[in-house]
């Protein structure tokens, strides 16, 4: 892992560098915020340890710039004890931690180690997420009409969920669930997914397995219990006519996902049918809702979310 040291005093940098040596991390040096940002352009660092008072660009400005680029990059500010005001400002711009000068070197090592460990876990999670999304894209790419489907559905579903005042945690799960909702299609033969012809009854039956396949694929994940409803139940319908479980009581946010899913399919078109305009697609959804095959509340939320975000219309 790489730590970036930012301090205008060469002696201070040397001292800190020596202190970090036992951690076995690669250390980069910069004399001010500007230089630090330039270095970060060249290669990524996993933690930034910065002095406060420096010429050209000080520690607070640097922290602000860093957090704007990557809110998860840990930034530790080195400050003198008395600077309470500065600490408050540091927190405001998003500093993760402070170390008092003169620096207690053992404390420095422990804090840096802790932040790096959290960063590593974070990156592992991001990697896992990326791997799953690559898998989803591979499935979507089999059919020109579904390319980008997961991402669009996630966007629409979040617009709708915000109308229902979903919590940040719920929004996070919904986003991931929406991105992955069709991951089970990875187990469906290509010629069925290609989407160049209306499906036969047998092909339809095959495709109907994808929610259960997706549920199985994601089972090893720790997040599985939270993602499961979205993946397994996005084709359930409130009148019980859906699949795979024929549920009548489907969680509301899952129904928002279903509405967003159908909205995207209608506005994307197929080789054998033209895409609908956003308003036309919503009218189809509203009709479905009146007839009990979609949740009225979910369709209402989707409509007002799309209107609020001015996202209505052909994508
Ligand atoms: Fe699906
Ligand atoms: Fe879908």
Image (cartoon, rainbow, N blue to C red):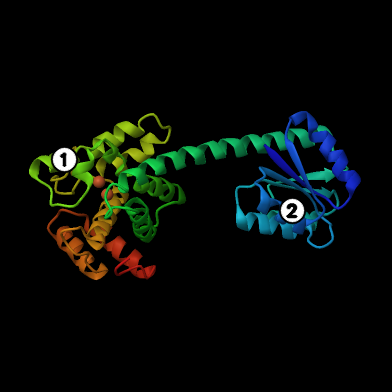
Establish whether ligand 1 lies closer than 8 Å to the Cβ of label 1: no
Residue in front for this viewpoint, 95 or 151: 151
Give me the residue at 22% from left, 38% from top: 189
Residue 181: which quarter of the image?
Answer: top left
Q: Within 8 Å: ligand 2 and the Cβ of disc 2?
A: no
Label 1: few (<14), some (14–19) or many (≥20) C-alpha neighbours in 10 Å: some
Please state the horizontal and vertical placement of residue 8, each as a whole percent of the image: 86, 53
What residue is drawn where x is 64% and y is 55%? 67
Work out how far the residue at label 1 is from the one at label 2, CA to CA, in angstroms. Answer: 57 Å
Q: Residue at 85% across / 44% down in the picture? A: 13
Residue occupied by mark 2: 36
Question: How would you rate the neighbour count of disc 2 (Cα within 10 Å): few for under 14, some for 14-19, many for 20 or more?
Answer: many
Name the residue located 60 percent from the left edge and 36 percent from the top edge: 120
Percent x, y of residue 143? 26, 50
Whether residue 249 is visible here, answered yes or no, is no
- SS at mark 2 in the image: helix
Point out the image quarter for the C terminus. Answer: bottom left
Q: Of circles 1 and 2, which is in front?
A: 2
Residue with the most extreme left position? 201
Residue 7: horizontal and vertical position, in percent? 83, 50
Q: Marks 2 and 1: in contact by CB < 8 Å? A: no
Residue beneath label 1, please? 246
| Number of numbered markers | 2
Quadrant housing the N terminus? top right
């Amino acid at each position: 892992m790489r730590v970036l040291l930012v301090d205008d005093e060469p002696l201070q940098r040397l001292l800190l560098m020596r202190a970090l040596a036992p951690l076995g991390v690669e250390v980069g040096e910069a004399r001010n915020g500007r230089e630090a940002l330039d270095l970060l352009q060249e290669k990524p660092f996993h933690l930034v340890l910065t002095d406060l008072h420096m010429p050209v660009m000080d520690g607070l400005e640097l922290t602000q710039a860093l957090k704007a680029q990557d809110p998860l990059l840990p930034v530790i500010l080195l400050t003198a004890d008395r600077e309470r005001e500065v600490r408050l400002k540091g927190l405001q711009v998003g500093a993760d931690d402070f170390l008092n000068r003169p620096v207690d070197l053992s404390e420095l090592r422990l804090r840096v180690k802790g932040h790096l460990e959290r960063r590593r876990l974070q990156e592992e999670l991001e990697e896992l997420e990326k791997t799953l999304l690559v898998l989803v894209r591979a499935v979507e790419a089999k059919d020109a009409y579904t390319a980008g489907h997961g991402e669009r559905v996630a966007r629409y579903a979040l617009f709708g969920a915000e109308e229902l005042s979903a919590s940040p945690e719920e929004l996070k799960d919904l986003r991931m669930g929406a991105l992955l909702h069709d991951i089970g299609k990875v187990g469906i033969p290509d010629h069925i997914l290609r989407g160049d012809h209306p499906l036969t009854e047998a092909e339809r039956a095959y495709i109907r397995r994808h929610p259960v396949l997706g549920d199985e694929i994601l089972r090893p994940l720790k997040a599985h219990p939270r993602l499961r409803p979205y993946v397994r139940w996005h084709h359930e319908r409130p009148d019980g006519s859906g699949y795979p479980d024929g549920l009548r009581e489907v969680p509301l946010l899952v129904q928002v996902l279903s509405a967003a899913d159908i909205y995207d399919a209608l506005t994307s078109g197929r080789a054998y049918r033209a895409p609908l305009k956003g308003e036309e697609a919503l009218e189809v959804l509203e009709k479905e809702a009146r007839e009990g095959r979609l949740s009225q509340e979910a369709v209402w939320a989707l409509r007002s979310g799309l209107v609020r975000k001015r996202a209505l219309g052909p994508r």
